Each structure stands twice: as C-alpha cells, then as structure tokens.
Image (cartoon, helix red, strand yellow):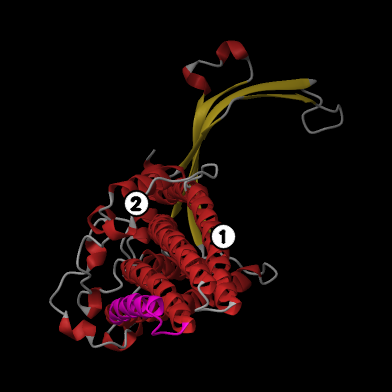
Amino acid sequence: MKKLLIYGLVFTQLLLLKSCFVAKDYERDETFEPDEKLFRTDEVEKQKDTTSVAELSWREVFTDTLLQSHIDEALTNNLDIRLALQQIMIADAMFKEGKAGFLPEVNFSGNVNYQNLAPNSQFGNFFNSITQYEAPVNLSWEADVWGKIRSNKRATQAAYLQSVAGHQAIKTELIAQIASLYYQIASLDEQIKITEKTIATRKKSLATTEALKSSGRLTKVAVKQTEAQVYTAEALLFDLKNELRFAENALSVLKAKEPHRPERNSLQEQSIGQQIEIGVPAQLLRNRPDVVAAEYELINAFELTNVARASLYPSFTLNASAGLQSLTFGDFFSANSFFYNALGGFTQPVFNRRALKTQLEVAEGQKEQAALQFQQTLLTAGQEVSDAMYSLSMLQERLLIKEKECKAYQEAFEYSEDLLKNGLADYLEVLNAQENVLNTELDVVENKRQVLQSNIELYRALGGGWQ
C-alpha cells in the first residue's frame, strides 16, 4: 500500500508540472472581430446606441397569430430540426465521454484458468493440470502531463456547442422560410383578387366595346383587342393560382405535413411587430448561430491539434489490480486468497511509421481550414446584413412611389373610360390604361411582400429567431 501511495504522489506531481504543459489555450484572432467596415452602411452609425432586433423573440417580430401557429408547428415537426436535435444528443454523449477522460478506467473480471501441463514441461513432473480461480479489479489511469486529456475534453465541448449553434441556425432559417412563404401566400391571394376583379372589369369593358361597335362608333378590331385583354388576365390568373399552390405545398413540407391549404390572414393585416433596430457593430453578429458554430468548429480543430501534438510526448500511466486468486474454489474466499499489484511507467513513441506526425500535420491543416471557414462565414454574414439593410431602405421608398403610380393609373383609366363613352378618346387609350392599372396594382402588392421579406432577411441576417 505504501508503494501505491508513492506512485500516486509521483503521478500527481507530474500532473502539476506546468513547465511541462504543451497544450495551448485558444485565443480569438483580432482579425475575426466584426467592425463597421464589414457592413458598408451608414445605418450602423445612426443606430449605434440601439439594441439589435436579433435579441427579440420571433413572437415579438411576427405578431400574426396564424403565422405564429405555423411556426410553432414547424419547430415541432420539421425534419431538419429533429435531425439537428439528434446531432446534439450525439455530441452531448461525446462530451460526457471527454469529461470522463481524467477518471481512471476500472474493470472487474472473473475467470477460471485450467491448464493441462506437458510431462516434459517445467512443472510437468509435479502437476498434471492446474486450475486457478481469479476475480480481480483492474485500474488504469493516465496522468495528463501534457494536456492531451484536457484538450480532448475541450474539443468535445466545442463540438457539442457547435451542434447546439447548428440547431439554432436551422431554427433561424426555418422561421425565416415559414414567414417568407406565409407572406408570399398572402400576397398571391391579394394578386389573385386583383386579377379576378380585373377580369370582371375587362368583361364589362368588352360588353361596352361591343355596344359601341353596334352603334358604329368602334370597329371589330377594338372588340377583339378588348377580348384579348380578357384572355390575358385569365391566363395570368392561372399562373398566379399555380404559384399559390406551389407555395402552399412548400409551407406544408416545412411543417412535415401532407400538402394542404394553410390558414392565413390577408396581406393588409401583415406587419413586422417591432421596428428593425440594428445594434452596435461589435454586437451585430453575436447572435448569428452560423458564426458561433463556425468559431466552435475552429476551437474544436484547435484543441485536436493540441491532442495530436501531445501524442508525440511520453504517456505516464499507473496500473493496479487487486482481488481474489486461488487454486481451489473452496479456498477462493479465504483471506489468504487476496492479492494486489501496482505498476507505474511511461511510454515514449519512437517509431510508428509516421502515424503520429501525420496526425499532427492533418490536425494543423484542418485547424487552418476551420479558421478560413470562420473568416468566410463572418464575411458572408456581414454581406447579408449590409444587403438586407440597404434593400429594406430602398424597397420602402420604392413602395411609396409605386402607390402613387398606381393611384395615377387608376384615375387615368377612369378618365379614359368616361371619354370613350362620350366619343372623346380612342379605345387604345382605355386598353393601355387598363393594362397599366393591373400591372401597377400587382407591382404594389409584390413590393409590399418584398418589404416584408426584407424585414425577414434582416432579422435572419442579424441572427434573430432562435431565442
């Protein structure tokens, strides 16, 4: 027992030798810190004291109750979400194993060893056969002198946190897709209503044109031109209904349900619940789960490099066993059957066909790859934020102009129709006015959808949605 204590003290001292510690600590490179240059916009400066909208729950941003129910259903049933949860469970199991790396390995075994001795063997003249009963407890422990076990623990922890961030990224993307499809469906509903109303109006215009032809004020050409406009609107209606069906089916798939007609409110009822605030530059991307996941991937690769480097150094181990051992089963539980032994030593790799050096070089290469991927993720995130901010600003201004344009065309159509009835306008003016009204009304609806979509994109680009 004294020897066991001595071995334990020796290995404890080895564990505390900081001068021998070869594992490095991860530190983020300053070049990976986001600043104003990453976003290319003056909006950051204007709002540098605001809180980022990404910190708000998606329920505060998307206030439509039907949309919220679709998002809830998708977060529960979506297959990508469920796959990500399974990945978290796998990573958690690996992390628990990594945390247990500091503990000794203990095994209990029991065996009966029967040996028939040859007469010409060393003990063959004394025994014909030997039967030995054993029930030992074996202990094996490795001292983490070089930080290999600690680094492996940190690597598994980073992998677990990366899987959590990956789940958050999928959740953010899923919420954005659900909201986008919901607004698209609402806008298509509105465009279909406009087109159906236009078809009815054009049919009335066709009747008016036929009446004017009968009175000799218009020709057959005018009638056919008006009739063609009716068919054009009807063909457009088919296209819109087809697009609507595709959007409805896509929304159903995201909820992991069979294709069906989802409930929804009208486009006029849609709005973003909170004013989009950007936040200070240093905080803009802190909520982006893909950025967080990319950094954890880098940390994982960094720690695995430590593990590979530490594998080149000697490993110090302590092995011990104790139990019962007897040549007869009747004496097996006797005090004289108790035995124990202990062995301390080290193993220094000398020649292993370059396997450990290759492992280190591969780990360092993978660490550099992870660093480049992290940098690329930051640049892409900055681009998405910059694009979304600029797009939202421009689309809001464009919507105001389009609404004015639509109102002007509507008034022009009303005037031209009155003039035509009084013989003061050409039928082509009426046809052009009708076409312009339909196109601008559809444009206004599409522009409203784009404004909502830009709000979604900015919320997603800032990392909102997973809270």
Q: Is residue 421 magenta?
A: yes
Q: Position of residue 185 (x, y in %)?
A: 43, 57
Residue 455 appears in which quarter of the rendering? Answer: bottom left
Q: Is residue 218 magenta?
A: no
* Residue farthest along the top direction in this orientation: 330
Residue highlighted by disc 1: 238
Q: Position of residue 107 (x, y in %)?
A: 52, 35
Question: Dot 1: few (<14), some (14–19), or many (≥20) neighbours within 10 Å?
Answer: few
Residue 21 appears in which quarter of the rendering? Answer: bottom left
Question: Dot 2: few (<14), some (14–19), or many (≥20) neighbours within 10 Å?
Answer: few
Query: Could you say whether the residue bearing mark 2 is in a helix, strand or loop?
Result: helix
Query: Could you say whether the residue bearing mark 1 is in a helix, strand or loop?
Result: helix
466 and 89: which one is in front? 466
Looking at the image, which residue is at 56% across and 58% down? 242
What label sits on residue 407 in the rendered view? Answer: none
1 or 2: tag closer to the N-terminus = 2
The amino acid beneath tag 1 is Phe
For residue 413, side relative to residue 203 (left or right): left
Whether residue 25 can be seen here? no
User: In the image, which residues are magenta?
Assistant: 401-426
| Label 1 to label 2: alpha-carbon separation | 83 Å
Residue highlighted by disc 2: 9
User: Quick check: 452 above or below 425?
Assistant: above
Looking at the image, which residue is at 45% across and 63% down? 204
Looking at the image, which residue is at 25% across and 56% down? 57
176 and 281: which one is in front? 176
Secondary structure that dominates the magenta span: helix
